[in-house]
Image (tube, grey):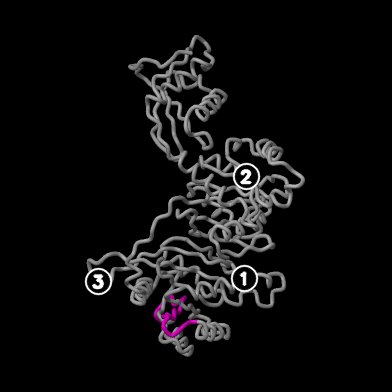
Amino acid sequence: MLPQVAIVGRPNVGKSSLMNMLAGRRISIVDPTAGVTRDRVTHELDLPPAKKGGPPRFCELVDTGGYGVYAGDDEYNILTDDIEQQIAHAVDEAALIVFVIDAQTGVMPLDQTVAQLLRKRVSKTKRMLLVANKVDNEKLEADALEATSLGLGVPITVSATTKRGKFDLIDAIADNIDYDLSHVPPKPTEMKLAIVGKRNAGKSTLVNALAGAKRVIASEMAGTTRDSIDVRFEVDGRSFTAIDTAGLRKRKSVQDDIEYYSMHRALRAVRRADVVMLVIDATEAVSQVDKKLSGEIIEHYKPCVLVVNKWDLVKDKLTPEDYIEYLNDALRGLDYCPIAFISAKDNDGIRDAVLMACELHKQANTRVGTGELNSVVKQILEQRGPSGRLGKQAKIFYVTQPAVAPPTIAMFVNHPDLFDDRYQRYILNNFRERLPFEEVPIKLLIRGRRREDKDAIAEA
């Protein structure tokens, strides 16, 4: 396990901006609204070697929510304990604490409170760096020195927005990390698994069940998760990454920039995943949001497990067979996907859902030889060929698989226009029956050839 570096502080000191600066890309959502970050958002950071020419080093950055973010806000007070529990977990597990203050506002009473809590919670053997953020120019250096009143040493001055002091901070982190742990490169996981769905479908509860710990905040309050959170977990000794995402709702219902960014990060999680779990709430009808997500999955040719959550609440009223029929009709483009009936709350059926995802990942990365492909296509054409018109007769010269994930099959033909959408669907359905791609999307490419220098496999 890599040494962890927890970034802590009160709201609006720029912790998430600091995280993004160190990562070199947008990891955490940044917005002036207090309470945007709620869960622990992580990123593996490359560190400079301990000596010139030495092996690379690594640590895991952990961005946390702002301490005291919802104090006095009755609507969101329900989340305060959960957020502060996540901060406490980050502090306890971290090898190094980066305590961030705002140099422009100066040391606030809440900064003093956080400093006192850290002194009580952090052991004397654990190291801590004091960082004064928003020091955009030299004139603000003197203001930053006010932070020495916290009794945590002289602050490192940075500006997350202009990247001023970035490499000084990285060097300071590297100097305070245990070399024996940080030189071990992070072990890649076998599969990235995006957990997507509408609000309150139970995605965070599912991620916590996979992780075997309260890794993300699960609440009955809609919209609790905002960032996309990468969480490592293991099943049967195999290591995976689950991507917890914000619950989506209709685009016209998106109220602010935070929801907009959350929605786009959830959609981006689909694109970077190897396999997607689309979480459906069994207690509610399939919604427009579920259909929007299924369209995104189809568009990007992502293998998908349809995860029917809260099945324990409806299993006395519905049968799996009836629900499968309903789901296939509601999400027509995903009718080839496997369906898992689970209760994330009770940790029931989750292992089977993960094993389904593993099987889809295997199918999506399978490669079929050209000889077998051509033989299968010949059989399909003998059974039914595309309709000819205006004296045109369809010929297929050869078939090959140029790529996997998604499995991509290219067919070189004389008249591509004869292979309309209806006939392509017929071909794809036959491929699923005859090739090892039964439950994954197949990308079919119909290509014309100018020189008919190869014998046709078959004529329609």
**In the visual, does 29 lie left or right of 330?**
left
Front position in the image: 352 or 386: 352
Residue displayed at 71% across by 38% down? 322
What residue span does the magenta drawing correspond to? 122-139
Looking at this view, name the residue that lies furthest to the front: 236
The three-letter amino acid code for the residue at tag 1 is Asp
Would you place residue 363 above or below residue 384 in this image?
Answer: below
Circle 2 crowding by C-alpha within 10 Å: few under 14, some 14–19, many from 20: some
Q: Is residue 260 visible?
A: no
Measured in 3D between alpha carbons, the distance from the residue under mark 1 to the one under mark 3, in whole angstroms, is 41 Å
What residue did someone put label 2 on? 292
Q: Position of residue 98 (x, y in %)?
A: 45, 76
What residue did someone put label 3 on? 51
**In the visual, does 325 lie left or right of 44?**
right
The three-letter amino acid code for the residue at tag 2 is Lys
Would you place residue 330 above or below residue 428 in this image?
Answer: below
Q: Name which of mark 3 and mark 2 comes first in the sequence.
A: 3
SS class of the residue under badge 2? helix
Magenta region includes residue 125: yes
Circle 3 crowding by C-alpha within 10 Å: few under 14, some 14–19, many from 20: few
Cβ–Cβ below 8 Å for labels 3 and 2? Answer: no
What residue did someone put label 1 on? 82
The three-letter amino acid code for the residue at tag 3 is Lys
